[in-house]
Image (spheres, rainbow, N blue to C red):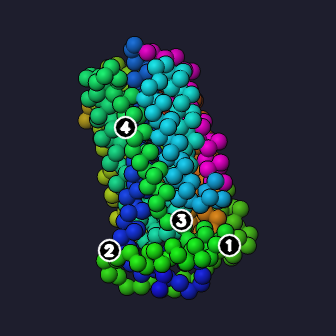
Amino acid sequence: MSLIEASEPGETCAAPRRLHLVIGLICALGLAIDLSELAMGGVLSAVFAAPPHNLSHGQLGWLVGSVYVGAIFGTPVMGIVADRMGPSRALSAATALLGATSLLAGFSRTPELLALVRLASGVALGAYLPLMVAYLTNIAPLGRQSSLVTLVCAVAGLAPPAVIWAVRALSFAKPMGLDGWQWAFVGGSIVATMTALGFLWLPEAPRWLASRGRPSEAHAVRRRFERSPELFRTQPAAPVERKDRWLHAEPSFRWRFAVVSLLFFLTPWATVSFPLVTGPILITRGFDLSGALLYIALASCGPPIGTLLSALLIDRIDRRLALIAYNGGMLLLLGLFASSSVSLGLAVALVGYGLFTSLTIPTMMVYGAEQFPAAGRSKAVTLAWSFNRIGAAAAPLILLPLVQAGREPWVMAVIALTLICAIALMASQSRLAPKA
């Protein structure tokens, strides 16, 4: 019996293997760097909005948004690379590129150079998450794909708060004359390079190998899993009928792609832009840089809790209903942040908002991946994810100038509108697709 989702009908999965654990750890390490690099956007927005930098709204918006502009182009390109080279090799290329650009970011002396380097980093950052989800859902034991993805996200989610707290501490010490944010990029470069080497050792997704006319290699990968010891005993899953051809032929396939793309586009206006505008908003409210970084660090404590909860809940509740609930929670906490002027209210709003954000992203990614057949999942998910990067690039370019112009209510209104639209989109859908 095969221990991965097989390329032939009737093959099933039994138990998670030690190799699955190794794959999960390497993927988590890469995602930790990915999330930390993106979380640095909030740090950079606070650092360069405060003295002595005091960047104009246009400069600050470009500095923060450049990474997402790079992701707009990099995401579909890396999706094509994954379709031709395989998901694991594409993940290796993405993390290797991230290692190089992070090192350059750490030694960037001007905001203009930093923005340019972050633009290049976006090519790798934009593609990592959808490629990782596509890879994990192809190699995970049948029935455990969602749990594996969310557990990886939970482990990786521990990195951003640790990085942000370290940045805050190092900003005062400045070892070797480098600011805290520079040390974060240098450290990320080292870990990203190590992760790139790890991906070269991992097996390629067997269903991708089979779809490329390489059945002998796919069989060899299956045998590699079979030789790996089980982590624990479990009952074999029931046989699952293949639905790849049915999904390709189904008239609603394009509709599924449109719905997933729209959901991906709406999400970053709330999940990405809110952390980016938090620092500048707090500074306009009268907080100094140290105080703003403290609240940003507190906000980063919510995601680890949320991703752990997501790992427990994702296979037990309908993903569509979960997304409605999570977006509703963010909407309520957004209102609390907008109306609160006391420390406790701000802390509750920011930690809670981060928690719901971390619940939303893995659920949304698994929901989106399940709409596409496994053979073409990497390409489909990354193409849909490019719409997420468009939204993530547009949000800071539009919202940060509004913050600096003193129009915070407009910022809150835009974020709230996207949350309401996401809720309405999910409420309008039935259970779209069976798992491929």
Residue position for label 4? 187
Place of residue 315 in the rendered image (x, y in percent of width and height, measured from the top left): 42, 69
Residue position for label 2? 231
Occupied quadrant, residue 33: top left
283 over 100 or under it: above or below: above
Nearer-the-camera pick, 232 or 245: 232
Q: Amino acid at mark 1?
A: Gly
Q: Amino acid at mark 3?
A: Glu
Occupied quadrant, residue 226: bottom left
Occupied quadrant, residue 117: top right
Place of residue 410 in the rendered image (x, y in percent of width and height, measured from the top left): 52, 30
Q: Residue at x 29, y 34 (%)?
A: 166
Residue position for label 1? 213
Name the mark nearer the viewer: 1 or 2.
Answer: 1
Q: Residue at x 69, y 75 (%)?
A: 245
Disc 1, SS? loop
Magenta-drawn segment: 53-80
Distance CA(mark 3)–CA(mark 2) = 21 Å
Distance CA(mark 2)–CA(mark 4) = 32 Å
Place of residue 29 in the rendered image (x, y in percent of width and height, measured from the top left): 39, 51
Residue position for label 3? 204
